[in-house]
Structures are given as structure tokens and as C-alpha cells.
Image (cartoon, rainbow, N blue to C red):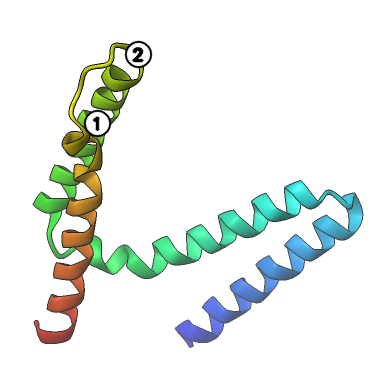
Amino acid sequence: MRYIIIALLLVLTIVAIYFHFKKSRDTKALLIDIALFVAIVIFAYYAKYFLINKLLFITHIALVLVSLWNFYLRLFKARGSIVWILSPILTIALFFTLGDFFRKFG
């Protein structure tokens, strides 16, 4: 029953995006709507991973903030390390790898 409701909501969302495009004929808005829809579906699928390791997720958020600060330093002051800028990519990869491991074997 739950999957039928989810499938119905997905179909209704796609139909709403189609009718919005048919009315406005704005391709930029259509692409933004489709990108947001895909992002929401992807985040909804990976939401089960967030419950597995909250500490790693909090570490990732902290590293994103440090990365943004280092990007600012590198962009405007010619200082900052590229390692700190790329570190959130490593933590999110580890986050999803651990989530997938525990989902399969845990």
C-alpha cells in the first residue's frame, strides 16, 4: 500500500510539472523543476543512510563549513589548502560506503 501511494505521488508530481510547462512554455523553469524533483527523489532514497552514522554526517557538515572557509581564503587571499576544500567529498563517500555496507551486511 505504501508503494502505491509513493508511486501515485511521483506520477502526480510529474503530471504537475508537465502541465506547468505546458502552460508557461518556460524551458528553464522545466529544467529547474526536473532537477529539483530528481534531487528530492535521490535524497529520499538516501535518507535511510543518515540514520546509520550520525557522527560521520556531523563531521561532514563541519568539514563542509571548513571547506567553504578555505575556499574563501584561497579565492580572495591566495591562502588555504586544497585538501580542506576537497575533504567533504571524502567524508560523504565514506558516509555512503558505510551506509551501503551496513544496509547489506548489518
Residue displayed at 83% across by 62% down: 19
Q: Nearer the viewer, mark 2 or mark 1?
A: 2
In this rendered view, identify the residue nearer to me: 86 or 8.
86
Residue corresponding to mark 2: 76
**44 with respect to 78 (left or right):** right
Quadrant for residue 88, please give it: top left
Residue 95 spot, x, y in % from top left: 18, 60
Seen in the picture, residue 66 relative to 60 is either above or below; the reply is above
Q: For the residue marked with disc 2, what is the amino acid?
A: Phe
**Label 1 SS:** helix
- Residue 62 position, x and y percent, is 18, 36
Marks 2 and 1, the one that precedes in the sequence: 1
Q: Is residue 73 left or right of residue 59?
A: right
Residue 65 is marked as 1
Q: Position of residue 73 (x, y in %)?
A: 27, 17
Residue type of the residue flagged with mark 1: Leu
Rendered-image quadrant of the C terminus: bottom left
Which of the pair 44/85 is nearer the observer? 85
Q: Quadrant of residue 105?
A: bottom left
Helix, strand or loop at disc 2?
helix
Q: How many marks?
A: 2
| Residue found 22% across the figure and 60% down from its top | 93
In space, the residues marked 2 and 1 are separated at their CA atoms by 17 Å
Q: Quadrant of residue 53?
A: bottom left
Q: Residue at x 58, y 60 (%)?
A: 37
Q: Residue at x 46, y 82 (%)?
A: 2
Q: In the image, is 22 to the left or to the right of 80?
A: right
**Residue in the foreground of this view, choosing between 46 and 76:** 76
